Amino acid sequence: MSSQILKLLPKTFIMPKLYSSREIEKVLLKNGFDFISQKGSHQKYRKAGNPTLTVILPANKKEIPYGTFKSIVGQSQLKETDFTK
């Protein structure tokens, strides 16, 4: 990064932890989601209930982008803290 960009960032700026597909999969399975299908590089997990929750997870990625991770958290109705345990 150039020094100009670094000056714009707050001193306390910390990059969020990036999770792998495998780490996210383990948390989903632990929280009652079942593997349903895979099409290409995307896996589908579902949790029965009211409402039925469906999560689409990119497969075989070492690092899931933070925005994609936030989308997975929203789809699963879990909290970010569930993934840090």
Image (tube, grey):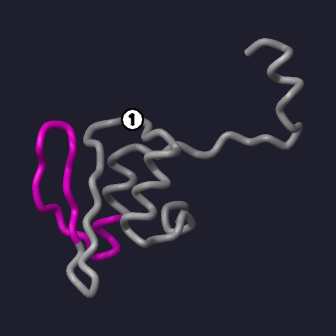
Quarter placement of the N terminus = top right
Residue 32 drawn at (x, y percent) = 28, 76
**Mark 1, residue position:** 62
Q: Residue at x 34, y 46 (%)?
A: 21
Secondary structure of the residue carrying tag 1 is loop
Left or right: 60 in relation to 6: left
Asked whether 32 or 48 is in front, the reply is: 48
Q: Residue at x 12, y 61 (%)?
A: 36
The answer to whether residue 67 is magenta is no
Q: What is the span of residues highlighted in magenta in the rendered image? A: 28-46
Q: Residue at x 40, y 57 (%)?
A: 72
Residue 85 drawn at (x, y percent) = 53, 66
The answer to whether residue 38 is magenta is yes
Q: Quadrant of residue 48?
A: bottom left
Q: Relative to 17, is 4 above or below?
A: above
Amino acid under label 1?
A: Lys
